[in-house]
Image: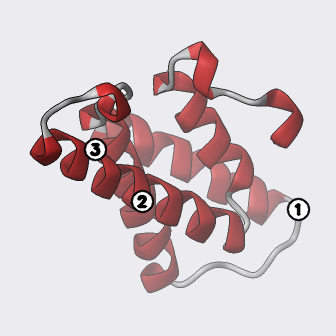
Amino acid sequence: MGIYLEKKMDNFYAELNLQGAKALDKNDREKKLSLMRSLNKALIKHDWYYTYSDDNNAWEKGNTNARIIQENIIELINIGLKDNAITMYEKYAPHQYIDKEAL
């Protein structure tokens, strides 16, 4: 998945440059790439049905991961990568967890 994300980010930066935006410094690029990777990792390992678990440890783990997902999405939205965050979320989330009207 790392190569896929890097290509997506490279395309994103190429679009910015074509639109005449300032070149982004390497730290900014790395921060955005790191957030994308973090979200991708959290989405891959997330137990979407943790709320149904009778095991408190499983529930805690799922709840913690859900918070990480939410925090990453909020950060990505705040730095202008809303579409990327939503696309990635929709790729992994079961259909009943996607609220098109809220997007």
Amino acid beneath label 2: Arg
x%, y% of residue 33?
Answer: 43, 61
**Viewer-proximal residue among 87 and 63:** 63
Residue that label 2 marks: 67
Disc 2, disc 1: CB below 8 Å? no
Q: Residues within 10 Å of mark 3 (few under 14, many from 20)?
A: many
Q: Callout 1, which amino acid?
A: Gln
Q: Is residue 51 left or right of residue 93?
A: left
Q: Quadrant of the N terminus?
A: top left
Q: Position of residue 72 (x, y in %)?
A: 48, 62
Q: Residue furthest top?
A: 95
Residue type indicated by callout 3: Gly
Dot placed on the residue nearer the N-terminal end, 2 or 1: 1
Depicted 99 relative to depicted 15: above or below: above
Residue 31, image x and y in percent? Answer: 43, 75
Counting every numbered tag in the picture gives 3
Question: Residue 94 placed where, x, y %?
Answer: 51, 17
Q: Nearer the viewer, residue 33 or 86?
A: 86
Q: Which numbered circle lies on residue 19?
A: 1
Q: Identify the residue at horizontal 54%, vertical 36% (top origin).
A: 88
Q: Which residue is mark 3?
A: 62
First in sequence: mark 3 vs mark 1:
1
Secondary-structure class at tag 2: helix
Secondary structure of residue under mark 3: helix
Residue depicted at x 33% and y 26%: 52
